[in-house]
């Protein structure tokens, strides 16, 4: 290894280390989970794997197929008994996982850029607002680096479609799917990239060049046929719901075309805003030049074909999922931010390209204005939905600060975006500074996102668990199991947070309504004697030595601890859940 690669490797590892330290410090400042009920599910799955060797949620086998992240953090829950401490270690581990994405992103950027510029692309990819997910027990922490590895592998397979490279793509695709089920869309992106490359490199007009271009990818076509056959066999044998896993109970809808288009536009707008406006415009230029220009280099053509396939399918799938799931309108930034490195690669490429054809400078100008205007398309009702889109926290903060003047503020901001984007993408002397400008712009965004998340997490902690987060574990013997009796007057978050931080909290019983949400629970009701019985399990009495419940109605037993600000009390029962007489 020569001196230059050694120096570059040191800088790259230093970038990973610095990002890990910064992200871990920020994540540790948040005192409570805030994305429900996802964080509870993945933490419980990890604890189940650590305790029993199987993925369980509330001691019931999980239907989740997204198991990789829970498997990665399970050793932490196995080694550390105190759940608040384990959670802190998980957040440090999250920071490392996310930061490791810099390595494949750097090697992806090297297809088009020199080492220093590639390092800058990696730095941009670690500065995006969505890196705030290091503070959460969420699959995004494992999916980001895996998605980067998949994209790099797909580029390598298109560059030289050997059997080994294609098998690596398939292996990473499978790993991604078992990390986040929605990564099945990477299969469509793979097919589109291979077909797109055959189309781009075709020669002649008789169509034979296209078919010859598909032939080197025969291992993928063979595996694809086997995979489709396997899915059909599963659907026939076990029903179509078996393919949906934990989402099988989700009621799906056929969306109206207008609603689907609105959601797609909103997702593109958030991707645009979360990456700093200019990168999306640069990506449009790369796509146009790489797909259509005769003088595009081979590397430009490869990255353009793969980039359009991955960005297009991931964005479309995230939007389509919201459209068919029904419910309220929201934007899943956390589902689309893994494609942001491709936009940063495009930004670095355009700002460092020596030859800029006049036609594509015009494309850059048009794309810059369009990208600057695109955030205006974001639907107001989607802003600020907890956990889905961190960058929209910034928009929400600006709206609150501006009040009635927000429309004027927004117009001024968008015009400013347009002027800056035009200058950075069309004026050569300024363009070289575009990555640095975007990186500096991320700093106030990061501060605003972290402040907002800290406020949300603090509010959840205040109303659900207080300062002594493991108050239940401290009050009962180590071998005790503490039931939860929930009624409709209580916040669901109170139950979730208490089981998140306390190992002894076990089964959840719901009375006075159904405890909506994915984690399993048992519906109960009091019989004529005031003893709680299962509604759907033969009306068997509910045995429990300890229970946490609201102080009204009073339960039979002795109150041994109280949780502040919530009315939740911990009761030592007389063996069964029963109303006080």
Image (cartoon, rainbow, N blue to C red):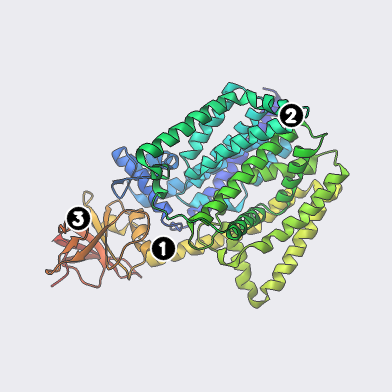
Q: Residue 410: give x, y in percent of width and height.
A: 70, 68
Q: 10 Å neighbourhood of mark 1: few (<14), some, or many (≥20)?
A: many
Q: CA distance from mark 1 to mark 3?
A: 34 Å
Q: Nearer the viewer, mark 2 or mark 1?
A: 2
- As drawn, the label of residue 537 is 3
Q: Secondary structure under badge 1? A: helix
Is there a contact, CB below 8 Å, between mark 2 and mark 1? no
Q: Is residue 187 visible?
A: yes
Image: 101 above or below 275: above
Q: Is residue 465 visible?
A: no
Image: 277 above or below 548: above
Position of 411 with respect to 537 (left or right) is: right
Earlier sequence position, callout 2 versus callout 3: 2
Position of 107 with respect to 453 (left or right) is: right
Q: CA distance from mark 2 to mark 3?
A: 65 Å
Find the residue positioned furthest to the right: 358
């Amino acid at each position: 290894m020569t001196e230059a690669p050694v120096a570059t490797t040191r800088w790259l590892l230093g970038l990973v280390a610095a990002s890990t330290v910064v992200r871990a410090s920020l994540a540790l400042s948040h005192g409570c989970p805030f994305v429900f009920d996802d964080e509870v599910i993945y933490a419980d799955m990890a604890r189940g794997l650590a305790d029993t060797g199987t993925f369980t949620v509330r001691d019931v086998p999980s239907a989740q197929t997204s198991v990789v992240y829970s498997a990665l953090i399970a050793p932490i829950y196995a080694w550390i008994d105190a759940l608040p401490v384990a959670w802190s270690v998980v957040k440090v581990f999250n920071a490392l996982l996310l930061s490791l994405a810099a390595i494949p992103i750097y090697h992806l950027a090297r297809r088009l850029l020199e080492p220093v510029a590639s390092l800058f692309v990696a730095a941009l990819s670690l500065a995006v607002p969505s890196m705030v997910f290091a503070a959460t027990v969420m699959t995004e922490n494992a999916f980001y680096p895996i998605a980067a590895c998949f994209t790099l592998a797909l580029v390598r397979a298109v560059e030289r479609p050997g059997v080994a490279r294609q098998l690596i793509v398939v292996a990473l695709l499978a790993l991604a799917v078992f990390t986040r089920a929605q990564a099945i869309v990477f299969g469509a992106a793979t097919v589109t990239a291979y077909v797109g490359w055959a189309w781009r490199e075709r020669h002649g007009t008789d169509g034979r060049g296209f078919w010859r271009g598909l032939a080197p990818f025969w291992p993928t076509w063979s595996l694809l046929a086997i995979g489709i056959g396997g899915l059909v066999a599963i659907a026939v044998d076990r029903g179509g719901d078996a393919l949906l896993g934990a989402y099988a109970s989700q009621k799906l809808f056929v969306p109206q075309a207008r609603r689907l288009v609105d959601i797609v536009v909103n997702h593109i707008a958030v991707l645009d805003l979360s990456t700093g406006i200019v990168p999306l415009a640069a990506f449009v230029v790369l796509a146009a030049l790489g797909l259509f220009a005769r003088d595009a280099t081979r590397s430009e053509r490869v990255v353009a074909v793969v980039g359009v396939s991955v960005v297009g399918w991931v964005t479309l799938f995230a939007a389509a999922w919201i459209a068919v799931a029904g419910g309220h309108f929201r934007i899943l930034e956390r589902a689309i931010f893994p494609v942001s490195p491709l936009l940063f690669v495009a930004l670095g490429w355009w700002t460092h390209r020596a030859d800029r054809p006049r036609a594509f400078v015009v494309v850059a100008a048009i794309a810059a204005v369009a990208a600057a205007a695109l955030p205006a398309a974001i639907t107001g009702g989607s802003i600020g939905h907890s956990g889905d889109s961190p960058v929209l926290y910034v928009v929400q903060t600006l709206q609150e600060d501006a009040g009635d003047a927000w429309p004027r503020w927004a117009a001024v901001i968008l015009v400013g975006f347009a002027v800056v984007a035009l200058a950075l993408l069309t004026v050569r002397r300024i363009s070289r500074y575009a990555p640095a400008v975007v990186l500096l712009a991320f700093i106030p965004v990061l501060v605003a996102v972290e402040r907002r998340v800290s406020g949300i997490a603090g509010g959840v902690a205040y109303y659900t668990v207080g300062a002594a987060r493991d108050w239940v574990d401290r009050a009962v013997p180590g071998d005790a199991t503490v039931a939860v009796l929930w009624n409709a007057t209580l916040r669901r978050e109170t139950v979730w947070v208490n089981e998140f931080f306390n190992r002894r909290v076990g089964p959840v019983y719901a009375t006075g309504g159904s405890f909506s949400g994915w984690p399993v629970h048992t519906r109960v009701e009091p019989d004529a004697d005031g003893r709680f019985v299962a509604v759907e399990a033969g009306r068997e009495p509910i045995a429990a030595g300890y229970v946490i419940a609201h102080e009204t109605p009073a339960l039979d037993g002795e109150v041994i601890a109280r949780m502040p600000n919530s009315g939740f009390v911990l009761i030592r029962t007389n063996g069964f859940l029963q109303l006080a007489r």
